[in-house]
Amino acid sequence: MKSSDGDGPKLAGSSAEQYVIKDPELFARNVARMIESAGKAASAWVNPREKGEVRDSMADPMADMVKTFSRLSEYWLSDPSRALEAQTKLFSGYLDIWSNAIRRMGSDGSAPPAETPAMADKRFRDPEWSTNAFFDFLKQAYLVTTKWANDLVTNAEGLDEHTRHKAEFYVRQVSQAISPSNFILTNPELFRETVASHGENLARGMQMLAEDIAAGKGELKLRQADYTKFEVGRNLATTPGKVIARSDVAEIIQYAPTTRKVLKRPLLICPPWINKFYILDLNPQKSFIAWAVEQGHSVFVISWVNPDERHGRKSWEDYIEEGLKFALDQIEKATGEREVNAIGYCVGGTLLAAALALMAQEGDDRIASATFFTTQVDFTHAGDLKVFVDEDQVAALERAMGEKGYLDGTKMATAFNMLRAGDLIWPYVVNNYMRGKEPMPFDLLYWNADSTRMAAANHSFYLRNCYMNNTLSKGEMMLSGRTVSLKDVTIPVYNLAAKEDHIAPARSVFTGCSFFGGNDVQFVMSGSGHIAGVVNPPVLNKYQYWTGGTPVGSFESWLATAKETPGSWWPHWHAWAAGLDDRLATARRPGARGMPLLGDAPGTYVTVRV
């Protein structure tokens, strides 16, 4: 092998010093500290299990993954020639890497790699992944292997759609987990940092791991940001307002006006209960709530309870009665107005759509228009969350929820993080526990970690009726003894999707438009994903949005002729909402009509931590 002053790739030479321990005694002391912290991590993991405070929940998902891979293996192993073909393809890929490495070590040092990562792949940006023969070999072997594994799923015949979807998802999870970028000895950057710090990064990282398991009370609570820099009500969720009412499942917040005149119709926001509402009020610069107030909307928000054992039997009907309808009652008391514009976000939008179908049958017409942020009402194309939803998995989840009356918030947070494990899990595992570095302060990731529990009956209804049986779009959902249909929802609808949404895919949101019964259904698609596509204030001038004709036909055809506009969709929505009824009224202040005030926004429910 050539040295660093030759023309071939580098393994030794001047760069080799970066991978040599210079102070073995100091390194040994840090390794001892790491081992001590490892003991604390193990204790934090084991003790809650010995006391019966934590029930291991890995068996069911692991069993499902094994079952899925068994179905995949059955296809490839049932025919010897097919199995040999698959093995030969993998072996051929390895031979290409080997022969490429030999050529690069010889006179032809510029031989192209057998496999290269995607341009957007941040894991292999360190130059040593390409210039160092050892790390380059590891990288290419990993890429060839994972591509081969994905091809096994793609080319397997006879798999039903759900099994294939699960196989693709699980292969992606395993592929991301075994990446050489995740391990000290196979990541050049981690290797260099370990040598340079004499192993102190390992000691710090193991200490952080022990702290995070302790914080999760026996489960790993992966920290994604420096949480100490944020506090709800202090520098998050600071838009002025008052809690004007409280039920078992919801606090109703009325925000203080900033304009002399406001739109006659108040605005009610129904956020998801899977996360907390202040994603729409992160800070003054990013707050949709504050912006809507500035545009002259009288804004009311539902802040859902973080449920515990008392809420286990709370159903969708309860969330409609004690949440949405309760809020409408309070708005009428606070403003004297009966008609409102309503916004639903994610599952809050699904609840709003179902409530509208129910209220149409009941003759309740208080909601005059509906806006849906990244909301699914039809779950045919529901994306990767469907991986977690089939009879076996839902039944296992229901058994687990039955013990406490709720699903731990960390379980849902982990599921959402797994949808983007390459962005939301493994970079933080590497940064925290191997580099030993605290993550940076980031308000969005603080919110992401501020998870909520799921009430058992509510969550079971959602999974079975929406993801499993798709009863809402089929007109088969039962609510309050009625079979409800979206065709009865004839009010104007503004349906917002996000182009890169992994939770409510744009195609799924588009498909849902056809199930509403009215003629005024606007479909708008923003750039970015489930959060950034929604929380995109005009002042930042980021991303773009697409508008077009009636959302009929295929999503691809609609997008091909849609008009792209740079920047935020917020002004477009406001123009739509104001255009429905532009009458003005004197601004309404919380408590002005004699309603008792229960405290300052953001209230008490939102501050309850898991």
Image: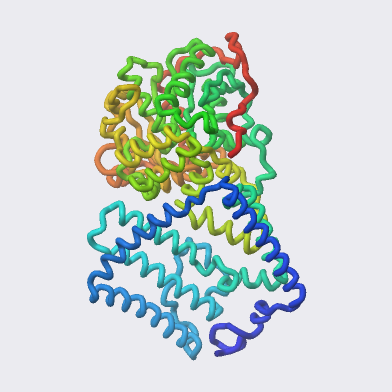
Residue 374 in percent (x, y) is at 42, 38
Question: Who's the residue at 48% across and 35% down the image?
Answer: 405
Residue 362 in percent (x, y) is at 33, 16
Question: Who's the residue at 49% across and 90% down the image?
Answer: 106
Query: Is residue 244 found left or right of 71 in the rendered image?
Result: right
Name the quadrant of the C terminus: top right
Q: Quadrant of residue 315?
A: top left
Q: Is residue 158 above or below residue 599?
A: below
Comparing 159 with 101, the one in front is: 159
Judging from the image, the colouring scheme is rainbow
Query: Is residue 427 found left or right of 264 in the rendered image?
Result: right
Residue 125 in percent (x, y) is at 54, 67
Q: Quadrant of residue 475?
A: top left
Comparing 524 with 283, the one in front is: 283
Work out whether residue 224 can be spotted.
no
Query: Is residue 586 found left or right of 391 in the rendered image?
Result: right
Residue 47 in percent (x, y) is at 62, 52
Work out whether residue 303 can be spotted.
yes
Question: Who's the residue at 43% across and 21% down the image?
Answer: 321
